[in-house]
Image: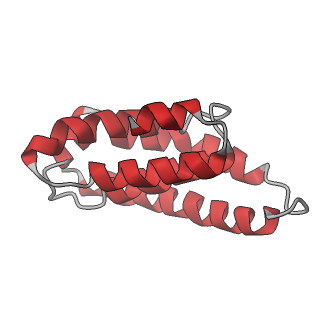
Amino acid sequence: MLITLCDARMDDAVRVKCIGALSALAQHAEPASLDANRVIASYLLGLLVPGRTGIETMLQAAESLIDIFADERAPTEANFRASNVLEALAGSVEGVRRAVKGIDRKKEGGRELKRHGEEVRDNLVAFVRYRGSLKV
């Protein structure tokens, strides 16, 4: 239902909240929750496609994916590998970079969004580099 609500809304603020809730659900480490984790991760990866959503939604999706798969010892690691999440995240870095670069600091809230975007971009790059170095 949260995915449907997120897709139905054009307002980035509502989408960001939906993604936050989805992220919390996807982090649930019970083996019975692995299907939900896979579906949510796949959905969030789709939000990293430039132009599909607003910049705030894209940034929240990137942050959420980092949070969901931060622990390589969690049961969700099986989904991380099976769904090639690392490759998908690595492939999204340039799109996130371009989106952040395109943020207009002069617009209302632009300065804060730009700062947040740069932080998310840096975290995404560091996460991809770290997870790639694990060779798990």
Closer to us: 45 or 132:
45
Please say if 117 is above or below 80. Answer: below
Q: Is residue 88 above or below residue 72?
A: above
Residue 128 visible? no
Say which residue appears at 61% left-offset and 43% top-offset: 94
Residue at the far right in the pictured view: 106
Res. 52 visible in picture: yes
Question: Taking 130 as reference, is 107 left or right?
Answer: right
Residue 122: quarter of image: bottom right
User: Which image quarter is the N terminus in?
Assistant: top left
The answer to which of 58 and 78 lies nearer the viewer is 58
Q: Residue at x 37, y 47 (%)?
A: 22
Q: Is residue 64 left or right of residue 16?
A: left
Vertical relation: 83 (above or below) 61: above
Image point 16% across, 44% down: which residue? 33
Residue 112, horizontal then vertical, whole percent: 73, 69
